[in-house]
Amino acid sequence: MTQLTSIQPVAGTRILGIGGFRGERVVPNDEIIAPIDSSDEWIRQRTGIVTRRRAAESTTILDMAVAAANEALEMAGTTPDELDVVLLSTVTYFEQTPALAARVADAIGATPAAAYDVSAACAGYCYGIGQADALVRSGQARKVLVIGVERMSDFIDPTDRSISFLLGDGAGAAVVGPADVPGIGPTVWGADGSLAGHIYQTDSWLNLREGTGNDTPADIQGGTWPTLRQNGPSVFKWVITNVPDIARRAVEAAGLTMADIDVFVPHQANLRITDQLVKTLGLREDVVVARDIVETGNTSAASIPLATERLLREGQARSGQVALQIGFGAGMAFAAQVVLLP
Amino acid sequence: MAFTEQEILAGLAEIVNEETGLPADSVELDKSFTDDLDIDSLSMMTIVTQAEDKFGVTIPDDEVKNLVTVGDAVSFIAGAQA
């Protein structure tokens, strides 16, 4: 009988380097409150956000991803030719094909690395780390570049009071490579498409196809470009009900207890969510909690690597510390894992 | 065993106190969560989630907007126990 050869797995994986890029424009609450009839105080109280970062007009989503990728490669001491896979998570790249990951791989000199995009919204980066861990541990890839990038400002409606005012533009990236001792714990992940109405796009792109005149329902309503919406209270309830258990399962899967966690990096959705999770999880009192949302806003797939990059750059966290990261968002996709910081 | 309306009110008052710091005795049946107790939509969801746990009931998201006063919540929870 013919026997196939399978690849030799490696003992473990680790995040070797991390990088970030934040939109150049610092956008304070005062700049966006008029169309939503709100106030700086209301936004701070409801979300914790003081400013959000948004990309300059001329900065493309590709530029942002490349900047974060190069920074992560530099920190990891990895050259682009060592990458076997470039895996990119986004919901704001408005070309159906080819994948943005392939363009990034080309721009950073990683061709012919395998390159593909993942659509898992705010859970996308943790989905990516889970896949990168599996690819490297199985021996299928030597090193994997994981990118979360969003130009959310292309996907907002300034008059929307549900989510647009939270959103920022940014990119975060991590290089995952082999390690003698595991530095990425098992990923606890899932999704619940029955709750697709919690965070959604206002309309299908297909309706734009007919929009050649002023004769389609979408044109008549004056809202032809689809934008993002959420049912904030329902999302909040889903998170506080489900995420603590997901987090506990990820910690347990890594063979640790909550007392072992040094750094907590939840998706930067809303400071109220972060605070509620901290209250519920029973983390150590001295645990470092990522609160990058205050200045950067909610950058969806980019928020966890950006928040991590900030903690390391500012010296609030250090290499080797045990971090619990957890992403959650549209499609109620979620993913959590414990990682050792690079 | 079902909770009485009095027990539900006392339990809710405890939850509201923990979430907002308001004195438990200020949580009365005719008080509006938003106008009198100054509870916003996210805090309301925390209260709802804890009430679900405490009283073993389900309060659907769509129902929350109908819980205007503390009395509305007490009645809904009392009815949902059945």
Image: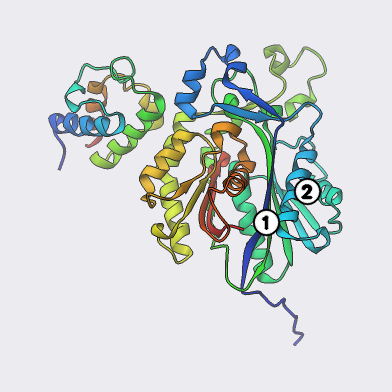
- Quadrant where the N terminus of chain A sits is bottom right
Q: Residue at x 31, y 23 (%)?
A: B67
Disc 1: which chain? A
Q: Amino acid at mark 2?
A: Ala
Residue A201: x and y in percent read 63, 30
Disc 2: which chain? A
Q: Which label belongs to residue B70?
A: none
The residue tagged 1 is A17
Tell which circle, 1 or 2, labels the residue nearer the N-terminal end: 1
The residue tagged 2 is A101
Q: Residue at x 83, y 56 (%)?
A: A110
Q: CA distance from mark 1 to mark 2?
A: 18 Å
Residue B44: x and y in percent read 35, 28
Q: Amino acid at mark 1?
A: Gly
Residue A316: x and y in percent read 53, 48
Q: Residue at x 16, y 39 (%)?
A: B2
| Residue A297 in view, yes or no | no
Q: Is residue A228 above or below residue B32?
A: below
Compare residues A317 and A20 and report the one nearer the observer. Answer: A317
| Residue A74 in view, yes or no | yes
